[in-house]
Amino acid sequence: MNRFLIKPLSPIKGIIASILLALMGFLIFLLMGVLLNTMLFGDMQSGLSTVSNYATSDGLMSIRILQVCQTIGLFLFPAVMLAAFSSVGANNFLGLKRIPVGLLVFSILIMFTFIPAVNLIASINAKIPMPAWMLEMEQAAMELTKAILTTNQLGVMLLNFIVVAIMPAIAEEFFFRGLIQKYIIQWTKNTVWGVVLAAAIFSAIHMQFQGFIPRFLLGMLFGYLYVWSGSIWVPVAAHMANNGMAVVVYYLIAKGVVPSQAETVGNISDLWQVGIVSLVIASILVWRFWKSTAAVKLNAHEASD
């Protein structure tokens, strides 16, 4: 297959191409989502109006459809397009290399351990004074999230897992770590700057300011998991574990299996000590992950000499 990009894009051109393709993908897939909603729920006006009505099952389904389309258009589309026409091939471009299952399991374990610490940091972040419009956006986002995830039906929970955990994990990691982080590292010639700036953009684009700090830290964790492992599937697994845990917890709360406090355990007003312990253990596991990947790279280098 002849590739359009005979030479790799420069970092600046790569970032610009990523943004332009994200905007193009957003418009294309948003239109596809609206048309799909129109076919499912009636005329064009019905397809649009159900989006704001999450008190009904149709309204929630229309939101899920638009969310999937938005995720694909904004994040997956630009990553796939740039990878498809890359001179180095899609696998190398996005870091789609095979990885030992143990590292994937390790990254998931880190994420599960880190969740109470995330709750603690989020509760501290929420104490920072913010303008009313930010708080209103935060409240609206929280209400929408709860409306989508709160269900006692296994089928709906599995659908939520696809929409909220699997799709965003793949699409966002392909875009933020596979494209943005890589281009920033090439541009600045500094791995730390690449990881930090990509994590900041990752957090800011979610437009949830009371969760900016914990999401920024998660972005840094995903970024370093990618840098250390060399495989995009490692941060994808960790990202999926983080989002998937929320999906499962809301389902178990709705079923009455666990108390409602399960979603906030570790925060500053609900067993904050668990959050501290979580932060310590997760930090140790991250250090162990770094050591194990460093040892693998060293052994591979010695074997090639």
Image: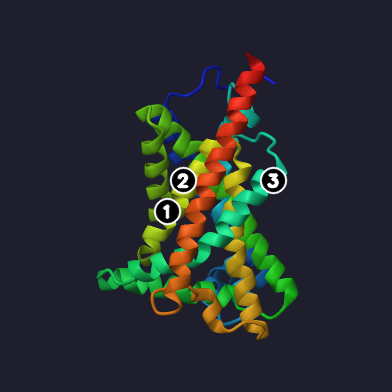
Distance Cα–Cα, label 1 vs label 3? 23 Å
Q: Would residue 163 be found to the left or right of residue 115 on screen? A: right
Q: Are the residues tagged 1 and 3 within 8 Å (C-beta)?
A: no
Task: Compare marks 2 and 1 and give the one earlier in the sequence.
Answer: 2
Q: Which tag is nearer the camera, tag 3 or tag 2?
A: 3
> How far across and down, in percent of the image, does residue 274 sit?
48, 71
Q: Residues within 10 Å of mark 3 (few under 14, many from 20)?
A: few
Q: Is residue 59 left or right of residue 125?
A: right
Q: Nearer the viewer, mark 2 or mark 1?
A: 1
* SS state under label 2: helix
Q: Position of residue 125 (x, y in %)?
A: 34, 66
Mark 3 or mark 2: whose residue is earlier in sequence: 2
Amino acid type, residue under disc 2 in the picture: Leu
Q: Which residue is mark 3?
A: 102
Instruction: Please provide percent x and percent y for residue 35.
Output: 62, 60
Mark 1 residue crowding within 10 angstroms, few (<14) / some (14–19) / many (20+)? some
User: For the point 64% across and 24% down, which residue is it?
Assistant: 300
For disc 2, the marked residue is: 23
Q: Residue furthest top?
A: 305
Quadrant of the rendering where the C terminus is positioned:
top right
Cα–Cα gap, marks 3 and 2: 37 Å
